Image (cartoon, grey):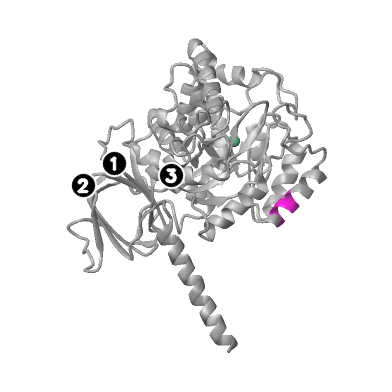
Amino acid sequence: MIRLLLYIALIAAVTVTHAEDAANPFVLFHEPVLALTHAQVIDGTGAGIRDNQTIIIRGENIADIGDEKRIRIPADATVKDLKGALVTPGFVLLHEHFFYTLKGGNYGALFRSFPALYLAGGVTTLRTGGSMSPYADLNVRRDIAAGKTIGPDVDVTAPFINGSFPLAFGMQMQRLNTSADVERMIGYWADEGANSFKGYINLTRDQLEAMVRTAHARNTKVTAHLCSVTYREAAERGIDNLEHGFLAASDFVDNKMPDECPAGKAVEIGLDGLAINDPRMKELQQYLIQRKVAITSTLTIFETFTAGRPMAPQAALDLLIPELREAYVNRYTLIARDAAARWTSLLRKNMAWEKQFHDTGGLLVAGTDPTGYGGVIAGFSATRQVELLIEAGFSLPDAVRVASLNGAKYLGRETNVGSLVVGKRADLVAFSAGVKSDATQLPAIAWSMKGGTAYDRGRILEMWKGQVGLQ
Ligand SMILES: [Zn+2]
């Protein structure tokens, strides 16, 4: 009898799951066997653009992929002709947040809208880059994994670890006085399920050392947005990853005091004092490469600080509540007037430094960082980051690889995701048109697919119109 009841319960559970799936208004299609034909493919490995490709998807995974002349389409497959449209892997981005800048140093939790919007924007795996609402981030990860809500697979970074300095915009951050505080915090969040830790601008060298030791003992990795500690000091202490390209490096500040984040614009001035091909930067990069430190490119956020750059697309601004849209446009307009500002030079230099780091063997990964004063918005930021890498001199296939396979490698997920190869999960982005190899912009996204299920970008954008800032 008990066995029979269990059996009935099991059937009921399966039925409910399927009914929910079919009723999910954001699912565009999911076929047991699917053949995508005539696709233009960039596979994420860095290999060149290939036309007329067939992709066979069985259930969740890529069963076959290659030239249409070589690939046999199974008799039971549903065929979708993509007619020359570009397909890339789903993006794997490493500096994302489920929050957005509100007012007065308040980061508003967006754990409802942003996961869905990231997925609509082609992101199928992400790492949050420091949390303001860690329980929400952990619960979102669980609910996505359980199929209760839609979004990318998530690696959760614990709350920011920022030393004791009381930041005006850091009221949501813990103030940590000692290395013991850091160890206690890491132990707690590792127990809760965080699998990444991020140091922030005011931590000390001792605290960073404690971070690396404690986090590594828990099989988790450490990244940081540095200032008080230099890139070299962090690499010496075994950090795994550094955020924001080379623009958070305080290594080049004159008379820098140990463990202190230099006041004012000293970091920017120090960096702007370097020529693009400055040997001191090359030397630092060589050391980072030797110590296997990955660098996260976040060109999208730096673009917003720079005059003469395009405004966020209208469809992205339409997602914001009116107050946030207005605040963004006002600040954008102020920055646009200041064409001589230092960021014009810094953005250009950082692009060149990231390219150089990549070309000399460094692991460059990508993130979009929806903070600053806004304008970097889930659903639109991933493709923009790829375009900015192209502007930095990366070939289109290399730019895609930085935003897919490289991220998967850093996260240790590369056997499952990050490129379009047989056996990996069918995580991909279908664009509305194809590209030429010298393209500097990507076509519009038509739909994105995670684990063989295609999601309706249009419906997701429509759902969250005017909501970003509220939920
Ligand atoms: Zn961030």
Query: Which sits earlier in the primary sequence, circle 1 or circle 3?
Result: 1
Q: Quadrant of residue 105?
A: top right
Q: Position of residue 187 (x, y in %)?
A: 75, 53
| Magenta region, residue range | 186-191
In percent of the image, x 58 and y 21: which residue is there? Answer: 271
Q: Nearer the viewer, mark 1 or mark 3?
A: 3
Real-space Cα separation, disc 3 to disc 2, in angstroms: 24 Å
- Identity of the residue furthest to the left in this view: 69
Left or right of residue 452: residue 286: right
Q: Quadrant of the N terminus?
A: bottom right
Left or right of residue 2: residue 338: left
In percent of the image, x 55 and y 51: which residue is there? Answer: 154
In percent of the image, x 54 and y 18: which residue is there? Answer: 331
Query: Which sits earlier in the primary sequence, circle 3 or circle 2?
Result: 2
Identified by mark 2, the residue type is Lys
Residue 469 at least partly seen:
yes
- Residue at which label 3 appears: 460
- Residue at which label 1 appears: 432
- Residue at which label 2 appears: 83
Identified by mark 1, the residue type is Ser
Q: Say which mark, if any, is on residue 406.
A: none
Q: Position of residue 296 (x, y in %)?
A: 53, 38
Q: Quadrant of residue 227?
A: top right
Label 1 crowd bin: few (<14), some (14–19), many (20+), radius 10 Å: some
